[in-house]
Image (cartoon, rainbow, N blue to C red):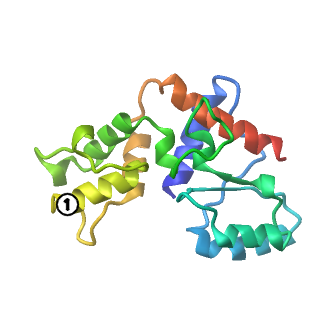
Amino acid sequence: PADLIYLKMMSAAAEAMGEGLRDEVTIVPVGGLDKLTTFIALLGASGLKLAVFHDYRGAPDQKLGELVRQRLLPPKALLNAAQFRDVTKLGQRTEPSDTEDLFDPDWYLQQFNGAYAKELGKKALKTADLAAGDRIVDRIKRTLSANKSEVRPSGGFNHYRVASYIASNPPPAFAADVINRFAALFKEVNSLF
């Protein structure tokens, strides 16, 4: 659901620059790769054209490869966040990436701090203090764990809460690189239909 918020919000922002998602494209969150095969089988059987946008952990996922091998999806319909993270290397897998990594890490961390201001109190996270790594979501989780900071009883943090906070407190404008990343994603999706 967090990705749905980001994609809708950024489509509106990128549309102002000429490249949002086409109106006939419907975003369907499936709740993870484990549930993807079922959704593809159901929706594909209805004759719908499909594309999958997913997080990239640093290596191809076997479940996604199986969808291509079974001809349930063409390879070009499998898109991941890493392909759009580096605006100088669009279309290439550069490093493990989540949708959140298409935003500026400092900005995303500010939004995280805003969403969890009550729980963090005066212990707001700073970029310099984050654990090393490629993915901002993972870096925040590992930092919370290392600092023994609990923002929720089960550990980690709720990605939807941050997305909802951003949607409720949108910035007046997004950085050009952020718009370019999402516009490149939307252009690729639009070209598939």
Residue 109, above or below 51: above
Left or right? Give the position of 193 relative to 157.
Answer: right
* Residue corresponding to mark 1: 146
Q: Is residue 35 above or below residue 5?
A: below
* Residue 48 point in image, percent of width and height: 84, 61
Q: Secondary structure at mark 1?
A: helix
**Residue 21 visible within the image:** yes
Q: What amino acid is labelled 1 in the image? A: Ala
Which residue corresponds to the image point at 40% horizontal and 56% vertical from the top-left?
159
Q: Position of residue 26 (x, y in %)?
A: 71, 52
Q: Position of residue 60 (x, y in %)?
A: 64, 62
Looking at the picture, how far across and down is residue 120, in whole percent?
Answer: 17, 51
Side of 33 where 129 appears, left or right: left
Other-residue count near label 1 (Cα within 10 Å), few / some / many at <14 / 14–19 / ≥20: few
Res. 23 in view: no
Tell me the residue at 56%/68% (across/down).
32
* Left or right for 50, reference 47: left
What residue lies at 53% left-to-right and 52% top-to-bottom? 3
Residue 64 vs residue 160, the one in the foreground? 64
> Left of 147 or right of it: where is 52?
right
The residue at 34%/35% (across/down) is 106
Is 53 above or below relative to 11?
below
